[in-house]
Image (spheres, rainbow, N blue to C red):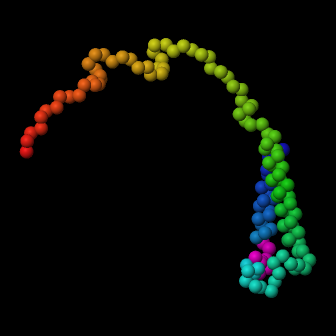
């Protein structure tokens, strides 16, 4: 169902683009509203042509398929909900298995930081 509506939606989309592009322009249209043209912005132009009726029909069908796809996609189950979750058995770590790093006490004299300051030598006069 979803795939069928998606294919129909893409077809209507391409058809709508084609219909709009092959129509002849009627002048400046929106630009004429600010330029003071004698043509009206949304006024009557006479009877609607076949192409304008096809554009309206394609736009309505495009909106309906968009709405249908939105509704269907919400109701569709996610692929993640259909995959069964298997818990891995808990196994104790052996001595050879790398695990979390644990601090070991350092041997005396290795890497120890002394808190006592080093003795200062007297400054030489200049």
As drawn, 3 above or below 56: above
Q: Is residue 70 visible?
A: yes
At horizontal 81% and vertical 40% (from top left) the residue drawn is 75
Q: Quadrant of the N terminus?
A: top right
Q: How many marks?
A: 0
Q: Nearer the viewer, residue 76 or 22?
A: 76
Q: Nearer the viewer, residue 79 or 116?
A: 116
Tell me residue 46's x, y (percent): 90, 79
At horizontal 77% and vertical 66% (from top left) the residue drawn is 18
* Region rendered in magenta: 22-30
As drawn, 7 above or below 111: below
Q: Nearer the viewer, residue 82 or 4?
A: 82
Q: Using the rendered view, name the quadrant where residue 104 is placed.
A: top left
Residue 90 forms part of the magenta stretch: no
At horizontal 71% and vertical 26% (from top left) the residue drawn is 84
Tell me residue 27's x, y (percent): 77, 81
Q: Is residue 5 visible?
A: no
Q: Is residue 118 left or right of residue 125?
A: right
Tell me residue 14's x, y (percent): 77, 61
Q: Residue furthest bottom?
A: 38
Q: Is residue 89 left or right of residue 30?
A: left
As drawn, 17 above or below 77: below
Tell me residue 102's x, y (percent): 43, 19
Q: Using the rendered view, name the quadrant where residue 107 is placed.
A: top left
Q: Nearer the viewer, residue 31 or 120?
A: 120
As drawn, 28 above or below 94: below
At horizontal 84% and vertical 76% (from top left) the residue drawn is 42
């Amino acid at each position: 169902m979803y795939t069928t509506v998606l294919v129909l939606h893409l077809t209507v989309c391409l058809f709508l683009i084609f219909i709009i592009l092959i129509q002849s322009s009627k002048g400046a249209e929106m630009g004429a509203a600010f330029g003071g043209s004698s043509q009206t912005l949304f006024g009557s132009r006479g009877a609607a042509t076949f192409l304008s009726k096809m554009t309206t029909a394609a736009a309505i069908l495009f909106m309906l398929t968009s709405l249908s796809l939105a509704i269907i996609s919400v109701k569709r189950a996610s692929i993640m909900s259909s995959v069964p979750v298997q818990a891995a058995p808990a196994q104790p770590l052996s001595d050879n298995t790398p695990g979390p790093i644990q601090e070991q006490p350092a041997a005396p004299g290795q890497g120890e930081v002394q808190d006592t300051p080093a003795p200062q030598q007297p400054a030489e006069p200049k």
